[in-house]
Amino acid sequence: MPEGGGSPVTRPLPLKVSERSIKHLVSSIEGRLGTRYRPGGTTPDGFDCSGFVQYLYKDAFRMLLPRTSGELAVLGAMVKKKQLRPGDLVFFSIDGNRIDHVGIFIGGKSFAHASTGGVKVNNIDEHYFFSRYACSARLVTTD
């Protein structure tokens, strides 16, 4: 949203951003590790998974995103797991029926997310997440 109000500006996804803003996103994640889980949480007082993504993308890229992981999953360009880049969103089906969890890929095989244990980093290939992985999407790019 423009500074000082005004109407939101719509841009096609993935949005071209600077390397610096990706680095800002990753350092912001590091600063939020350990933040408590709160159902429906969208602030540093407590996050749920999609609230965490929504908060960080607004801070790093000034993007206003939908509120649920299912709504987030239909945005951007689909990305193969082996082509993930920092800032990409990774989606999971915990209940096996729908996309109900989201995290932010930060590099290597690591992603950050807000789970019932709070904000933390996990390996995408850990059995729990590997078996529940659904898809990935790119909402921002440096290309």
Image: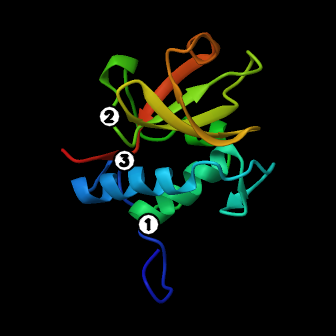
Viewer-side label of 2, 1: 2
**Relative image position of residue 65 (x, y in whole percent):** 55, 55
Residue type marked 1: Arg
Residue 62 is tagged as 1
The residue lying at 40 percent from left, 54 percent from top is: 27
- Across and down, in percent, residue 135 comes to 51, 23
Q: From what the image shows, is residue 104 above or below residue 53?
A: above
Find the distance from the CA under tag 2 to the CA under tag 1.
19 Å
Residue beneath disc 2:
85
**Total residue callouts:** 3
Image location (x, y in percent) of residue 88: 41, 38
Q: Amino acid at mark 2?
A: Arg
Disc number for residue 138 = none
Residue 78 visible, this angle: yes
- Residue drawn at point x = 74 percent, y = 56 percent: 41
* Residue 13, label in figure: 3
